[in-house]
């Protein structure tokens, strides 16, 4: 690959980062739908490749069965994501609620870890308490307000993509021209 091709690939990637970030901030619903469809197509491609790989194994051993099951799951999820993309996007708040419940469970687990560490008089055991409280609080907030959680996640992701793209542009410029 020539230096020009490398530079062009980097510039295209930087453009995509900034473009995706701006789209997330200006039209998150349309971007979400497009992202779900693209992810579905990727799952379909991975599923087809995995299915081909699994069917080319001649034995019924574990790798064959695992590859076949994973291929079928990828294909099914890919079809669901492509055909029912809007339903998947509409389910984001439900996924956020589930994630909130998982966060609360993880926070409770961290709280039990705190008590174990405290009983052994380990230094800085109080950090586990802080982590537990923050995890539980975040889980409750996400569970009680999943729409805001999804919107905030897209907003943060949009700003992160723009920031990363701008930073990558500076790194590119200073790496190749200075």
Image (tube, rainbow, N blue to C red):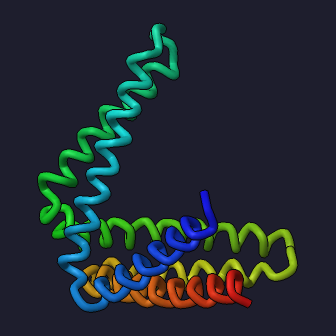
Q: Quadrant of residue 141?
A: bottom left
Tell me if residue 30 comes above or below residue 57 in the rendering. below
Name the residue rendered at 78%, 79% in the picture: 125
User: Where's residue 110, x and y in %?
Assistant: 62, 70
Tell me if residue 157 comes above or below residue 72 in the rendering. below
Tell me if residue 41 comes above or below residue 159 in the rendering. above
Q: Residue furthest top?
A: 59
Q: Nearer the viewer, residue 103 or 54?
A: 54
User: Where's residue 127, x and y in %?
Assistant: 72, 83
Name the residue rendered at 52%, 90% in the picture: 166
Q: Is 159 displayed left or right of 74 in the figure?
A: right
Name the residue rendered at 48%, 79% in the picture: 14
Q: Quadrant of the C terminus?
A: bottom right
Q: Is 158 displayed left or right of 175 in the figure?
A: left
User: Where's residue 96, x and y in %?
Assistant: 32, 72
Tell me if residue 149 comes above or below residue 78 in the rendering. below
Q: Quadrant of the N terminus?
A: bottom right
Q: Quadrant of residue 35?
A: bottom left
Q: Quadrant of residue 171?
A: bottom right
User: Where's residue 102, x and y in %?
Assistant: 43, 65
User: Would you say residue 147 is visible in this rendering?
Assistant: yes
């Amino acid at each position: 690959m020539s230096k020009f091709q490398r530079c062009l690939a980097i510039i295209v990637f930087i453009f995509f980062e900034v473009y995706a970030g701006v789209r997330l901030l200006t039209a998150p619903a349309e971007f979400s739908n497009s992202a779900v469809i693209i992810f579905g197509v990727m799952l379909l491609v991975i599923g087809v490749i995995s299915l081909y790989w699994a069917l080319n194994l001649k034995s019924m051993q574990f790798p064959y069965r695992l590859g076949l099951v994973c291929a079928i799951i990828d294909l099914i999820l890919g079809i669901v994501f492509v055909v029912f993309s809007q339903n998947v996007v509409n389910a984001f708040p439900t996924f956020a609620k589930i994630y909130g419940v998982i966060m609360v469970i993880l926070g409770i687990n961290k709280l039990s870890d705190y008590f174990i560490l405290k009983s052994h008089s380990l230094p800085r055991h109080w950090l586990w308490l802080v982590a537990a409280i923050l995890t539980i609080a975040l889980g409750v907030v996400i569970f009680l307000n999943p729409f805001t959680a999804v919107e905030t996640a897209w907003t943060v992701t949009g700003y992160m993509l723009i920031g990363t793209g701008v930073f990558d542009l500076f790194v590119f410029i200073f790496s190749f021209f200075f």
